Structures are given as structure tokens and as C-alpha cells.
Image (tube, helix red, strand yellow):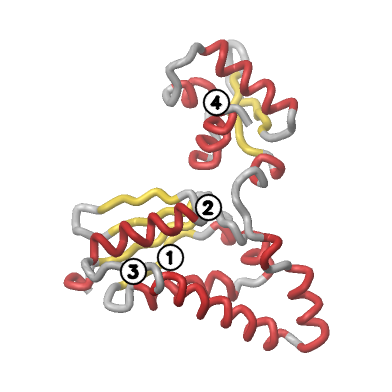
Amino acid sequence: MARTKQKLLTILKRNHVMTIEGMMEFFTISDIAVRKHIHELENQGLIRKNAIKKNIGRPAYEYELTQAGNRVFPNHYESLSVDLLKDLEELQGLDAVYSLLERRMEKEVDFFHSNNIPIDFDEKVAKVAELQEDRGYMVELEQKPDGSYEMRHFNCPIANLANAYQQVCKNEHKVFNAVFSDSYVNCVACMTSGDHYCNWTIRNPKDK
């Protein structure tokens, strides 16, 4: 996919809905060129436009990703199929599914610990954010005035799994608690709850 089109999709993934004027702030190419790429993405079924109600003047539009557009971004659907878990639940019960998800959680903790996570708080947060970005979570990291961090995930590579089994999100919280064992970690927004992104707050150990 052309770089400009991929950039447009990424901008919409991070910002959810935007007007063309808003998207233009991220480009140095002409308005006409951007509109052409947007029109092509519409034709491909990757984005859609919605009319903004106005009392007077020409109608305005805002754009967002379609389901097909969201599927452009990394996902791990093949690695742990919801259909297989549903079959396991039918055959052996929900406890068997939870046991399997718990095993996945343990592997997640091992993954972080095997990647030489620094001891220093700021360096640890930066490293975890880097690892999550590499795994397709589209991470945005912000340090707050009190020294704590907000780590936002704009993409969930296992969204279908998390939507089918809420235990997945609970386990993710346990993973972060294990990685930041001497910190306070809280999830203040979650895509499975209808939020646009998952938002993790991580507080410096000395401020617990």
C-alpha cells in the first residue's frame, strides 16, 4: 500500500474520526492529492465518510475506518482462534478456556522478562512501550507532570479474542502488574468497553 494511504489509515486509527482539514495537518502535500487518496480508500472500502450536520452552507464530512480498514492493522487472530476456544468451552467447559488463557498470560509475562526490562522506572516504561509498539499495539506514551505515565494502545492485535472473553483484558492487567510489580497500574479506558483506545496509567513506585 502506498505510503500516503497507509499514513491516512494510521491517522484515522489513532484519532478515530477526522475531517479532511484535520488530516491535512499531518501532510505537506496538496489538499487535492490527499483528497484523491481518501477517495481511493473509500472505493476500497477501508474508510467511510459521515455527514456533519450544519444549519447553513455546504455539507461537511468526517472520516473513519471501516471494519476492513481496521483489519489492515496487525492482529494475532490466527495464533489463538476464538472458534477453537468456543469449541474447547463446549467440550470441556469455561474453566478449561480460562486455564488456557492463563497459560497465555504466563507466556506474556515471560516475554517481557526475557527482553531485559530495565530496573529504572522511566526506562522500564519506555522499553515496555517499545515492545508493545513492535507487536502492533500502536502505542502512544505520555509522561504526566507528577511523573506517572499514560500508555495508550490504539490497536489491539487480539481484539476478537478480548471481545469474546473478558478474561483476556483482566489477564492483561495481571501481566502489567507483574511487569511493573513495584508500581501502581490501572486501566482507565478499554476498547472492549467501547473506548477508542486502551489507556494504562502507570505510577512511579516512589509515589505509590
Q: Which mark is residue 91?
A: none
Q: Badge 3 local density, few (<14 within 10 Å), some, or many (20+)?
A: few
Nearer the observer: mark 1 or 3; the answer is 3
Residue 164 is left or right of residue 127, and the answer is right
Which of disc 1 and disc 2 is earlier in sequence? 2
Q: CA distance from mark 2 to mark 3?
A: 20 Å
Looking at the picture, does residue 120 appear above or below residue 106? above
Residue at image point 64% right, 45% down: 70
Which of disc 2 and disc 4 is earlier in sequence? 4
Q: Badge 2 local density, few (<14 within 10 Å), some, or many (20+)?
A: some
Q: Amino acid at mark 1?
A: Cys
Residue named by callout 3: 116
Residue at image point 59% right, 75% down: 167
Q: Amino acid at mark 2?
A: Gly
Which of disc 1 and disc 4 is earlier in sequence? 4
Q: CA distance from mark 2 to mark 1?
A: 19 Å
Nearer the observer: mark 4 or 3; the answer is 3
Looking at the picture, does residue 51 appear above or below residue 95? above
Q: Amino acid at mark 4?
A: Thr
Residue 114 is left or right of residue 157, and the answer is left
Residue named by callout 4: 4
Relative depth, front residue between 156 and 203:
156
Q: CA distance from mark 4 to mark 2?
A: 19 Å
Which of disc 3 and disc 2 is earlier in sequence? 3
The answer to the question of whether label 2 and label 1 lie on touching residues, with beta carbons closer than 8 A, is no
Nearer the observer: mark 2 or 1; the answer is 2
Q: Which mark is residue 187?
A: 1
Residue at image point 59% right, 57% down: 157
Figure quadrant of residue 128: bottom left
The answer to the question of whether label 4 and label 1 lie on touching residues, with beta carbons closer than 8 A, is no
